[in-house]
Image: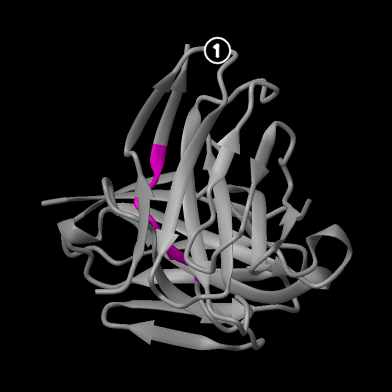
Amino acid sequence: ILNVEQSPQSLHVQEGDSTNFTCSFPSSNFYALHWYRWETAKSPEALFVMTLNGDEKKKGRISATLNTKEGYSYLYIKGSQPEDSATYLCALIGAGGTSYGKLTFGQGTILTVHP
Amino acid sequence: DGGITQSPKYLFRKEGQNVTLSCEQNLNHDAMYWYRQDPGQGLRLIYYSQIVNDFQKGDIAEGYSVSREKKESFPLTVTSAQKNPTAFYLCASSTPSGHRNSPLHFGNGTRLTVT
């Protein structure tokens, strides 16, 4: 099973702060990477799908970068708001072996934004 | 509005009983998935189906069974052979191109408690 690590496990920030967190994965087994936001009592919602080294994607105040050679992706939130509070999930599609074609999720980063 | 419907939201069963979780989608997606979430762990893949009348085991298929008789429906049966069935179950779907380029769409989940 592919090893997808997210850090930190949880994060508390003040409204207006900018923040970022990391998704790490084995660089030799990369096919595509997904980021999802999961708010309490709702279903996970897709933020980004990234496939190319050097990819940068942006959606409002949230952006993500991808480095497939070193095996990591960063998610940035600029000027955090209380409504950004959620669990952010990273998921990787493996390129070989038993991981091929399957989406493997990290444990998630729980973000709490305090007013 | 198109979406994925999981029912029921909460389910309680006695140990030794089989139980079936419902998942219906009207997004016209070919691929459907079942994930399980346990505290402190990422989402883990139970079963997936890329087309009607075909499905494959995920990483933790033991003690579960599925069927895919209709494109819209992918029910999951938790059998008495599943050693730790109490968990949160999420159903998802994606477009025929697969999730290399397309994100997953999730239902709201079913929380199963077995006593």
Task: Quadrant for residue A58, please give it.
Answer: bottom left
Specify start and end residues of the magenta stretch as a single range: B104-110
- Give the letter of the chain under mark 1: B
**Residue carrying label 1:** B15
Q: Nearer the viewer, residue B61 or A79?
A: B61
Q: Nearer the viewer, residue B59 or B80?
A: B80
In this rendering, the answer to whether B102 lies above or below A106 is: below
Q: Would residue B113 be visible to someone looking at this image?
A: yes
**Total numbered circles:** 1
| Residue B107 forms part of the magenta stretch | yes
In this picture, residue A100 sits left or right of residue B38: right
Task: Identify the image quadrant of the N terminus of chain B.
Answer: bottom left
Residue pictured at 75% horizontal, 78% vertical: A69
Residue with the most extreme right position: A97
Residue pictured at 60% horizontal, 75% vertical: B99
| Residue A20 forms part of the magenta stretch | no
Q: Nearer the viewer, residue B67 or B81?
A: B67
Percent position of residue A2, x then y: 76, 55
Residue pictured at 72% horizontal, 41% vertical: B61
Local secondary structure at mark 1: loop
